[in-house]
Amino acid sequence: MIGPLATVRWLLDRHSPTLDQAVLTDFINQGHFARHLRRMRVLYIERQQALVEAAAKFLPDIMRVPSLDGGLHLIGWLEKKIKQDKLLTAANAVNIELMPTSFFSTQPQNKPSVILGYAPYTPDEIYQSVKALRDAYNKS
C-alpha cells in the first residue's frame, strides 16, 4: 500500500497552487491578515455582547447566556421549567436555528442547553431575533 499511496500523493502534490501561495504569503507578511483578525475580533465581540444583552433582557426566564472570551457561538442554558422541545419548536416557527448541545454528546445532559450562533448577524438583527424567539415561545 505504501507504494501506490506515495504515487497518489506525489500526483496530488505536484501541482501546488504557487501563485495562490505567493499571494497568501504576501497578504500575511504585509500585515493584512493580522489587521483582518483584529477587525473581526472587534466585530464578533460586539455581536456576542449584543446576544448576551438581548438574552438578559428578553429571555431571563427562558435561558441564561453567559459570555465567553472568544468564539462565534454561545451556549444558552435553559432554566429548569423550560421544555427544550417547546423552545426548539418556537425557534423554528420564527426561522431561528437552535442546536441542542445534546446532539454533540454521547452522555445524557444534566442541564438542557442550546447553541446560539451570532457571527453573521448585526446587533440589531440579534436583538430582533431574540425578541422574536421570546414572543414565539410565549405564544406556544
Image (cartoon, grey):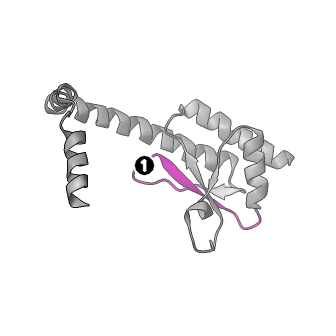
Percent of width and height locating residue 103 = 60, 61
Q: Which residues are magenta?
A: 66-81
The quarter of the picture where residue 22 lies is top left
- Is 81 or 5 nearer to us in this picture? 5
In-image side of 48 versus 110 (left or right): left
- Is 109 or 121 nearer to us in this picture? 109
Q: Residues within 10 Å of mark 1 (few under 14, many from 20)?
A: some
Percent of width and height locating residue 119 = 49, 39
In-image side of 31 versus 58 (left or right): left
> Is label 1 in a helix, a strand or a loop?
loop
- Is 131 or 114 nearer to us in this picture? 114
Q: Residue at x 55, y 62 (%)?
A: 104
Percent of width and height locating residue 55 = 63, 48
The quarter of the picture where residue 53 lies is top right
In-image side of 85 versus 12 (left or right): right
Q: Residue at x 64, y 69 (%)?
A: 111
